[in-house]
Image (spheres, rainbow, N blue to C red):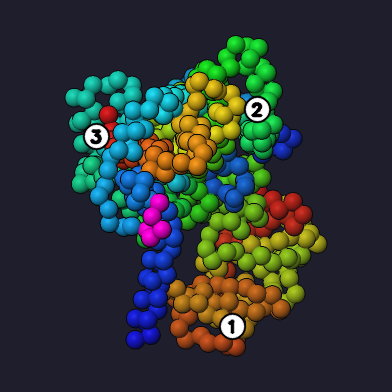
Amino acid sequence: MANISCTDIVKSYGAYPVIEGMNLSIPDHEFVVFLGPSGCGKSTMLRMVAGLEDVTGGRIEIGGTDVTDLPPGERGVAMVFQSYALYPHMSVADNITFGLRRQGIPKSEIAPRLEQVAEMLGLAPYLDRRPKNLSGGQQQRVAMARAMIKTPKVFLFDEPLSNLDAKLREKLRTEIRKMHLQLKTTTIFVTHDQLEAMTIADRIVLMRDGKIEQMGTPDEIFERPASRFVADFIGTPAMNFLHATMEEGHVARAGGIAITLDPEAFPSLKPGQKVELGLRPASMDLCEPGVENAVTGTVVLVENMGAEGQVITEVEGEEMSFVTQRFRRLSQNDTVHFAIRRDKVHVFDPNTGQSLRGV
Amino acid sequence: MGRLISVTLTRALLALLIVVALGPILWTVLGAFKELRDIVTPVPKLLFSPTLENFATILRNPTIRDGLLHSVIVVSASVIIGAALGIPAAYTLARHARNWGDDVQFFVLSLRFMPPVAIAIPFIVIYLDLGIYDTLFGLILVYLITTISTVIWLSVPAFERVPLNIEEAAAMEGCSPFEIFWRFALPVASPSLFGALVFTFVLVWNELLLALTLAAQNATLPVVAASITSLGKEVPWGVINAATVLLVVPPLVFIGLLMGLLNTSVQSGRK
């Protein structure tokens, strides 16, 4: 087990910079998720830690050792790929134990370790099979067993669940999390699925265009997004954005909508300043007309999500949505009033997209 | 009812195609077991008393026997050396030299554009000067151009189809590039490589022109078989048919053996 530290990492393909000066430090035992849209450099970053990609500039250390120029096999890391990458010409047992056999570890020592990981991942009945005779979920478990049996210093997961169906993805996600609670191995997990990241991570590194946009616990990322990009990327249904102008009394006005902001959270706002408000649908609910921060709109569509419903409304020509449990009595063209608590409003600079939250 | 008719028609058509495809081969095999008077009768005979005389003639004839031996030596040497050099070269092109892989592949293919006649005459002169004219070594050397280029040309796509992640997973386990090639890329690509080898084998086994021009005493089987057909009016049809069968059998045996080998190697990936 080990901490990971990346200093001034630069990666470019020819003249194309993919990652520009990234600094990252991951303490021992932590489960870190690299999250971001496709092409943001998260997989490239992971592959550089693994040693599968050359680093153009900078330094990677694992457990205090400089591994920047070491081949993948000497870094003490194990990786699980999206495509499983099982060896098709070997049985499941041979797939799992290949690395140990290659190191010349005696069979008597391998057997109990194989039994242990097979037991842990429920693979015991399949050890003699070929990978192609297993389902996708089983194949990914074999890939995980192959990584685990080596007891590496660091686990690397490259979108391991993306090829699985929704239900299985959820199940394996829980298993990976449980495995981490038990083994406590430092882990980097790459995904583009924000829900996966929120549920599994100790800390999320949200990336965009080869740079870190925000780094923090899932709560920090969700409650205090550092930029409009983060706020938009995290949370379902997606956040509503509203261009507004500040008025006296910490009120942001957009046409007929007036939202009162928390002066302690946004002390720097001045009257006349242009801002962009972020209102999470899940932070809003139906209200009586006239209460603070109430918005009035016309129902366009009601999406039933089971326990609650997303109501999409039209407010002064713009679409806005909110989530409520009392959605069943709403129907199209109804006039509704909904409101948000002032401490739940996010405010961004309309030009830079940065959060205007003080402190 | 309509379905029955269409099924029957399809089957009849299929049967016809099989007869067209296999008829000549069957006729050759039958001819190999016939006496000459059974072959030259105006009415084709399906029932006759078979004879092994034709095969005996061939195997007793030192020219044909030597031709067979020479063919086996020349072809197996050029295919084995061609595979030993061509397969690693193809892997390197597919994985480690991507930048000029396309150029090399085109160059390799361009070797096959060239009509053999174009190189046969200069080769005679060069071989005479080098003192390797009419030697098996000389033939192997010239066939290597064919085998190496064909093996490379057909193996590069075979290696490109091996999922890169498998090789990366092996690298994560500490395998060196050679180990990755030998223990992962090669076994995973083996079914396609097998096809490439068989194709190459057949190509040189049937080669006539270069063998005809570059060898005299040390002729290969196609040369000998060709020379029998130009014996004059009294054509020994039975002997020719037997020689043809003999010419066809080794590739079939070779394919069978390789297939068996392949099946066992794929099943016994464990060690």
Q: Earlier in the sequence, mark 3 or mark 1?
A: 3
User: What span is in magenta?
Assistant: B40-44
How crowded pointer 1 is (Cα within 10 Å; few <14, some 14-19, many 20+) is rated as many
| In-image side of B58 versus A64 (left or right) | left
- Name the residue located 24 percent from the left edge and 46 percent from the top edge: A126
Q: Secondary structure at mark 1?
A: strand
Q: Secondary structure at mark 3?
A: helix
Quadrant containing the C terminus of chain A is top right
Question: Where residue B111 appears, x then y in whole percent?
Answer: 65, 33
The kind of residue on which mark 2 rests is Ala
Compared with A122, A97 (above or below) is: above
Judged by depth in the image, the label closer to the viewer, 3 or 1, is 3
Task: Tell me, for residue A334, which label it has, or none.
Answer: none
Compared with B136, A133 (above or below) is: below
- Name the residue located 53 percent from the left edge and 60 percent from the top edge: A235
- Seen from the viewer's position, the closer of residues A99 and A300 is A99
Quadrant containing the N terminus of chain A is top left
- Residue with the mark numbered 1: A299
- Name the residue located 45 percent from the left edge and 73 percent from the top edge: A305
The kind of residue on which mark 3 rests is Leu
- Name the residue located 53 percent from the left edge and 51 percent from the top edge: A192
Magenta stretch contains residue A86: no
The kind of residue on which mark 1 rests is Val
- Residue with the mark numbered 3: A114
Q: Is residue B1 visible?
A: yes
Judged by depth in the image, the label closer to the viewer, 1 or 2, is 2
| Majority secondary structure of magenta residues | loop
> What's the CA distance linking mark 2 and mark 3?
61 Å
- Seen from the viewer's position, the closer of residues B91 and A153 is B91
Q: Chain of mark 1?
A: A
